[in-house]
Image: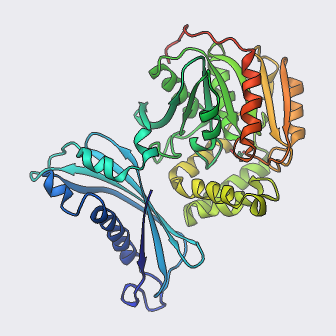
Amino acid sequence: MHEVDLTVYPDECDPFGHLNQASFLALFERARWEVVGRGPGMNVFSRHGVWPAVRKTSIDYVASAFPGDVLRFQLVLTHRGRTSFIMRQTARRVADDALIATAEFVFVCIDREGKPVPVPEEIGRSFASDADTAVTRIAVHGVGLAVDDVGSGPPILFIHGFALDRTMWRHQVAGLAGWRRIAPDLRGAGQSDAPDLGYSMATYANDLAALLDALDIGQVVLCGLSMGGYVAFEFLRRWPERVAGLVLMDTRADADTAEGRKNRDALIAGTRERGPAAVVEALLPKLLAEDAPTRAPALVAEVRQMTERTPVAGIVGALQAMRDRPDSTALLTGVTVPALVLVGEEDRLTPPDVAREMARALPSAELEVVVGAGHVPPMEQPAVVTARLARFLEGLTVRPSDRPTV
Ligand code: MLT
């Protein structure tokens, strides 16, 4: 992540004093060049005989900025292909930390004749943080997924929740020795590509099956949190023979109610209008344990940033996928593998009673209620969750082969 502070001047604003949208685009551009200047140097592209042509720009203007405001621009390289790369940028007002805008820029490197040429290695290196450079990207069904693939042993696949990304599992990915820990960003989340259309539980599950194929993995333990649980159900419905164990965290098996579907539509409209800020407002106050703002402000900030980084297309797609998901209640009784149902004691979105009901319906399930956690126990009580997972996994057998083709 790279940061640059820029001041808004009166000549960039409209007669009402709001930062003008075209001036804002110029500030995003200025912030990128500042980073280039401080890093590899402004002549980095000409040094390599390459020019980065903008192929696509999308900006969500979330709030107004005014003359004198200092905006902090953060930049992250989210994708590096052979000839193209994608940068995501956010602008926050330094005085009150308000999110003002988010943007995504797709670049194609071209030569003097306008032909696409490979992205210079130096660009990838200088824009990427340590975490970015370590990311493996795997293309499935034409969409690049960012994935952490760590360790060796029987595989466990972590599926993140809505408007979060694979980094929510970082403690478990770091801590579960003896297992191959695979944590992808679903399409439209984190550093994965975010196509404009084509989101459903089936698409997410298909992506994951193709990802496992690409990694040459047959059976896995599936571990999904909340929306990740919905994806796990869809995977289980399609490929039960690939599932060696099931971990359902802070999720539910039933479909949305009519009222729930209406709320999804309202949030879709809000997100289209105001970007990820609409989701932060609607979800963040209920996401973590009630005392999180005072006990764990850094965690609240981390979760908020995760949501703010999520592309609008990915948020809207996920909301549509959740709204239209099928009921999976009947699936529970047919699960033949061991299951762990885990829930935060203070989960206000999928409360412990929902988890108890699922555990009762599953033929062979253990239930764990995590004290001091809300809807995201892997981040709120990481050590407890990792230890509990390790205990559950101890008893499991995972077959390495028998890989069907998707
Ligand atoms: C999630 O955390 O993934 C969401 O709360 C799930 C949902 O909205 O149903």
User: Which residue appears at 82% of the width and 58% of the height?
Assistant: 290
**Number of marks present in the image shown:** 0
Instruction: Work out whether residue 331 can be spotted.
Output: no
Query: What is the x, y in percent for residue 202?
Result: 59, 31
Vertical placement of 174 versus 78: above or below? Answer: above
Instruction: Work out whether residue 132 can be spotted.
Output: yes
**Res 105 → quadrant:** bottom left
From this viewpoint, which residue is outermost toward the left?
113
**Res 386 → quadrant:** top right
Say how the picture is coloured: rainbow
Is 130 left, or right, of 297 in this rendering? left
User: Which residue appears at 26% of the width and 57% of the height?
Assistant: 40
User: Which residue appears at 59% of the width and 55% of the height?
Assistant: 307
Vertical placement of 87 versus 14: above or below? Answer: above
**Res 203 → quadrant:** top right
Query: What is the x, y in percent for residue 267?
Result: 66, 58
Is 154 left, or right, of 334 in this rendering? left
Query: What is the x, y in percent for residue 50?
Result: 16, 52
Which residue is nearer to you in this view: 250 or 398?
398
**Quadrant occupied by the N terminus:** bottom left
Which residue is nearer to you in this view: 202 or 24?
24
Query: What is the x, y in percent for residue 204?
Result: 56, 34
